[in-house]
Image (tube, rainbow, N blue to C red):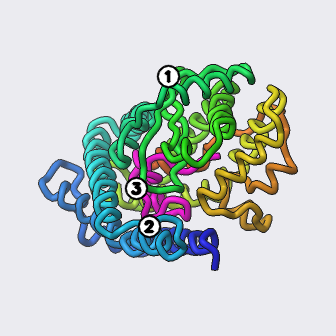
Amino acid sequence: MTYARSRLWLGISGVGTIVLTASWLLVGRWHEKILPSSEVWQDDDVWGLSAFIGAFLLIMLPFDLLGGFVLPNRHRRQSIDFAHFFGRWLIGVMLQSTLFLATGLAILAVGRQLGLLGVLLLLAVLCTAYIGLQGYLIRLTTDGVQALPDAQLRALRSNLRRWGLATKSVDVLSHSDPGFTGGVAGLPGKETIVVPGSWFRRLSEEQLAAAVARRRVAIDSSSRSRGLLLALAWVLVGFTLSTLLPGAGVESVAQLVTTSAGFTLWTFLGLLVLPTVSRRASYSIDGQLVERGLPRQLLDSTLVALDRLQDDEPQRPTLVETIFHPVPSVANRREISSAEGGGAWHAARMVLFLSWSCLGLLSRAVHCNAGRPELWIMLPTD
């Protein structure tokens, strides 16, 4: 079995386990017998939320081990010793668990005082904060910012000017996972393009410029902003609907866990629906780049090089791509490129990151990021 197929089955197993667990909670409501149901503050609230987060950690542990340590070593995608993996994993788990606990307590505090409308306002603020702080959070799970040599920076700017694009802010991050792609971080108008440090060794100067140019076009065409707005709307609508389920709400730990389970199923629906608009945005950005003068041959070679750094799966069955992959295959992107506006760039996977604000349990269970803390915060993009 190839690395790509191994990860796909890992993701199916992880997502399936979480979805079944969430369904079990909604149908059986067993957690209501052991978690605090009081709608006023008590010390057990902290322990109840901590127990819920701890159970999530234990459920994800085998998938984290497989996705972050066993499969990459078995398929020789990277040579990583267990101590290094465990250190990175522990940082990621502590970061997410701390934010989950703080978020859960904040939702309870606001929910008890202001009800659902107050919580929705809180979630909008939290999502906005996650978007604005994403660049800082990702540094906590990588080796930090890497200085960009002046010669490479001049070459990058020179290539981008050929296609009528400005460099603006670019952060280069050192990392250990070859599947880390970076992305775009920050609120609209204050974006930073994040680039993996390994790309400067593994891509040519023109290929690197082409990869950065795609992100610049995603910003300039507002495709990235549309992706953020769609992801935010999906999260807020899903949370609202989840609070309407039997036993759900925002005023007790038991209610919040029920809401989290319902929101997890809503997130799963997003995994099926949203990849289509993300793929459409990819095709549109490719077309816009070619219209700006980027040679088609250079674009194709860049796509091939980046695909090899990730799952090395240039061609996929149509059904597999439709359901599981918001980033189109290299083969499809060679055949399809429309410069017409449309789609919402990276919306499908941005929902997973923003779902942290709602205690979303699928945020680190999908095939591309299971066991890979850098990719829990900044999921792979095109």
| Mark positioned earlier in the residue sequence (1 or 3) | 1
Q: Label 3 is placed on what type of residue?
A: Pro
Q: Label 2 is placed on what type of residue?
A: Ser
| Mark positioned earlier in the residue sequence (2 or 1) | 2
Spatial separation of the CA atoms under disc 2 and disc 1: 36 Å
Residue placed most toward the observer, 358 or 89: 89
Q: Which circle, 3 or 2, is nearer the viewer?
A: 2
The answer to the question of whether label 1 and label 3 lie on touching residues, with beta carbons closer than 8 A, is no
Residue appearing at x 35%, y 40% in the figure: 115
Instruction: Please give the residue where the numbered disc 1 appears in the rendered image.
Output: 190
Q: Is mark 2 on a helix, strand or loop?
A: loop
Q: Position of residue 363 (x, y in %)?
A: 46, 56
Residue placed most toward the observer, 200 or 262: 200
Is 179 placed left or right of 109 in the picture?
right
Query: Which mark, by number, is residue 79?
Result: 2
Location of the N terminus by quadrant is: bottom right
Query: Which mark, by number, is residue 373?
Result: 3
Q: Where is residue 36 in the image (x, y as percent from the top left)?
A: 22, 61
> Is 375 part of what is drawn in magenta?
yes
Residue 290 to residue 58: above or below: above
Identify the magenta region: 356-382
> Is 279 part of what is drawn in magenta?
no
Q: How would you rate the neighbour count of disc 1 (Cα within 10 Å): few for under 14, some for 14-19, many for 20 or more?
A: few
Magenta region's main secondary structure?
loop
Residue appearing at x 35%, y 68% in the figure: 81
Residue appearing at x 52%, y 39% in the figure: 195
